[in-house]
Amino acid sequence: MRQYILKRVLLMIPTLLGVAVLVFFLLRVLPGDIVELKYAGTGTYAPKQAIERERAQLGLDKPLWQQFLSWIWGIVRFDFGQSMWTGRPITHEIAIRLELSVELALMATLVAVLISIPLGTLAALRQDSWVDYFVRVFSIAGLAIPSFWLGILMILVFIIYFRWLPPLTFTSFWVNPKANLMQLVWPALAVGYRYSAVATRMTRSAVLEVLREDYIRTARAKGLWEKVILVRHALKNALLPVITVIGLEFAFLVGGLVVTEQVFNLNGIGKLFVEAISQRDYTMVQSLVLLTSFVFIFVNFVVDLINAWLDPRIRYQ
């Protein structure tokens, strides 16, 4: 098991390096210049000398290989540099938004797990009954309804029928838990519902497949209780693909809720991503892509460890 963990950890390094190379050079191919965008926003004429001086201050006048090596050396020292647009440290810009995005992703994942696993298992046990049909309609509706549209409906219902609007200013959970939950519980429900639809269908399919295996029929022939068969034998094996789906969806939620954050006025990582791209803030985009890639790689690593714990065949290999 230690060799398996060490191997997976070492594989993260070339993966992150490949992501860093791709994002750095692909950004330089995109049209547009951050310096020209800055001066265009002020509405004043900028002479060529001023533009060149600004580019030199940002380090954009250096050769690409030198810019890349300087950025990589900063990452090795955990120094992501400064934002080209705001001039503030990138670690500060990300840190003030990361708490919101991670908390929202965790809450949405919790909602999805609490909905999907019981419903998916129940639908598999009651296959082709009215319960199964209800769960399938419920999950298909979750896939068909975008989370941001559901969020708009929730806000309209609160305003029209209850004359209440969720708090618009983010409050940390450690400062005021009640205000924090009052703001994030609604986007978590909207996102978690769609998230649960995918996991519910996967749970149903996996449990149905496992229930048809020979060892399940053997366990029933031996007279084991149905609850013991389901929990100890069927559900444990059926959870392997479900955990993989849940992990990948969680990694996506950390930086992929751009529209939902706009609807609920949440200043998270997704919104920062869009702003950085529109402003051609190279250093910010590079850091955000690297952060998102690391989240995906780390979540995949954790999922693989959980799968290895659940399935001894993976651990023994």
Image: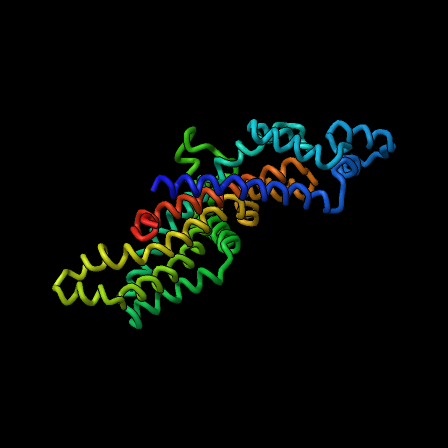
Image quarter of residue 45 = top right
Depth check: 168 or 7 in front?
7
Horizontal and vertical percent position of residue 108: 42, 47
Q: Residue furthest bottom?
A: 128
Expressed as whole percent of the image width and height from the top left, the position of residue 69 reads 66, 33
Locate residue 174 relative to residue 213 in the image: left or right.
Answer: right
- Is residue 222 shown left or right of residue 70? left
Query: Where the N terminus falls, by quadrant?
Result: top left
Residue at 28%, 54% (x, y): give it: 236
Which residue extends farthest left? 223
- Would residue 317 be found to the left or right of residue 51 on screen? left
Q: Is 279 displayed left or right of 219 in the figure?
A: right
Please name the residue shown 42% across and 33% down the image.
173
| Residue 233 image point, x, y percent | 23, 57
Residue at position x 35%, y 56% in the image: 116
The one of 248 and 50 positioned closer to us in this rendering: 248
> How many dots with numbers?
0
In the depicted structure, whether residue 183 falls above or below residue 125: above
Residue at figure coordinates x 45%, y 32% from the top left: 172
Q: Is residue 136 visible?
A: yes
Say whether residue 268 is visible: no
Percent across and percent down for residue 240 are 35, 54
178, 56: nearer the viewer: 56
